[in-house]
Amino acid sequence: MVDAYTRLVRTAPGRALAARTGLPRPSHLPRRAERPQPVLDPVVVLGSGEGAEQITGTLLGWGADVRRRFAETEHPGSVVIVLDAIERPEDIGPLVLPLAEAMRGLAAGARVVTVSRPAAGQDPSRDAARGGVEGFVRSLGHEMRRGSTANGLLVADGVALDAPSVTGALRFLLSARSAFVDGQLLRIDAAGAALPESWEAPLAGRTALVTGAARGIGAAIARTLAADGARVVLLDVTAAGTELARLANELRGVPVQLDVTAADAGDRLAAFLRERGLRLDIVVLNAGITRDRMFANMAPDRWDPVIAVNIASQISLMRDLLAADAPAAEASGSADAPAAADASAAGRSAAAPVLGDELRVVSLASTSGIAGNRGQSNYAASKAGVMAFVEALAGQLEERGGTANAVAPGFIETEMTRKIPPLQREVARRISSLQQGGLPVDVAEAVAFLASGPAGGVRGQTLRVCGQHMVGR
Ligand code: NAD
């Protein structure tokens, strides 16, 4: 799905006109179908020491063509800069500057990934150096050309650079799956669970629920999770029943017609899962709506439904699913589980659990929730709420080996963004480093990564999938 302007600037006269007038010239972004290999070769690893050796070992294990200096290759496809041992801001330059000369020779669609440690609030000089890497990555993202991107991993002190979470995240950022992720720093807090048996089907044996699955980003998430080997449970409102059934047929998934804002949605879902003998390992909270209006014209009919669908339903759905698995006494004694009186309806406690132990919850936020957006005070409130919600939920799930994270899409080509007035839509599409809207599959790839086993070390974070949109950080 390429927009009309992008089609125009990819013709010879359009390209010439854009070059003459300085208009954006968005590059083609290869996705996984076009570039299935995990790394675009050759890969140059910059840095020395144990961390760089561990990263090199990981890359070699994938069969990558690894070089340790730019002199050894003319057109690198990937560059990994290992900065885990820096102590002073002056240490950054010698590690990153070799890339400066090589920038113009990078292959189209190249990836630059830094691997460093987050500031830990202990050593001013070391923290300044670590913080400096973040500024470097964010700036480099803006300067990348021809569909290339720059991102970074911030690996917590004590987590080895060959830990499963680092390996999983590095693979995501180097591959075509991260086509629309640019200028982002992803924090890895823990080593994470084991690597998947097969990188081709990293979600094999898992069952995933996707809310709002009938169309747009939700449908793409369902397709991507299914392609990665998961069994999918597809939830949407009754009005979307036909599309939902079609998708369920295509993916051999299980359709559920349910309004997530219904007071008994969580209990009905728990009962449904038990009836079908299903246990969820992955919950993707994607259902969302917009009711844009300038705040001066805002009234409850536009404010309330947005809060209800986009955030309140997520809180109650997770509360009720977790309560459905809690022992009966605990559930009825918990102030957080007012629906406990219906325990028998959901077959609570005595029956099989509805959630797996290493649960992965991924919720849909938005860049509007990070930076705010004119006309979207209701939507931004709901999406900022999502980001805070996953942080708190991640804390609750940690004990059982679970995680909760969010993905914040920028401008994605869907029905939702087709409703934006044309001029505003065109501007929103172009004001990112990649100068184009993302595709639903780009969001889906990030969700699939956060839903995977190795992402167990990523906790309570929001990963932006926005082509480094100028809005927000
Ligand atoms: P969409 O409108 O195309 O699809 C949303 C789906 O959610 C629909 O199938 C709808 O029927 C379903 N849904 C709505 N209310 C529901 C309810 N009460 N119960 C069950 N299902 C319900 O939207 P999209 O563009 O695919 O967006 C998906 C998510 O991504 C949303 O949370 C949205 O806020 C977020 N997002 C989208 C963009 C974008 O650019 N499209 C940007 C940022 C965030």
Image (cartoon, helix red, strand yellow):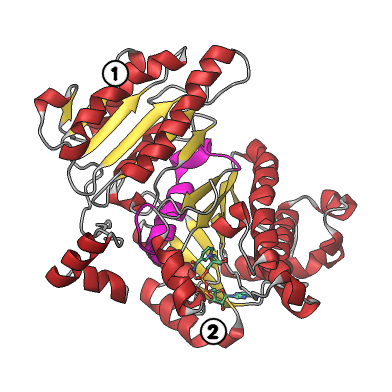
Residue at (36% x, 50% y) in the render = 178
> Between 422 and 216, which is closer to the camera in this rendering?
422
Residue 352 picture location, percent across and down = 65, 57
Q: Which residues are magenta?
A: 433-460
- For the point 39% across and 71% down, the residue is 251
> Quarter of the image containing the N terminus?
bottom left
Asked whether mark 2 lies closer than 8 Å to ligand 1, one says yes
Q: Is residue 14 above or below residue 26?
A: below
Q: Pick whichever, 34 or 453, lies toward us.
A: 34
Residue 439 is covered by the magenta coloring: yes
Residue under label 2: 240
Relative to 146, is 3 above or below? below
Residue plotted at (49% across, 50% down):
464
Residue type, numbered disc 2: Ala
Label 2 vs 1, first from the N-terminus: 1
Disc marking residue 53:
1
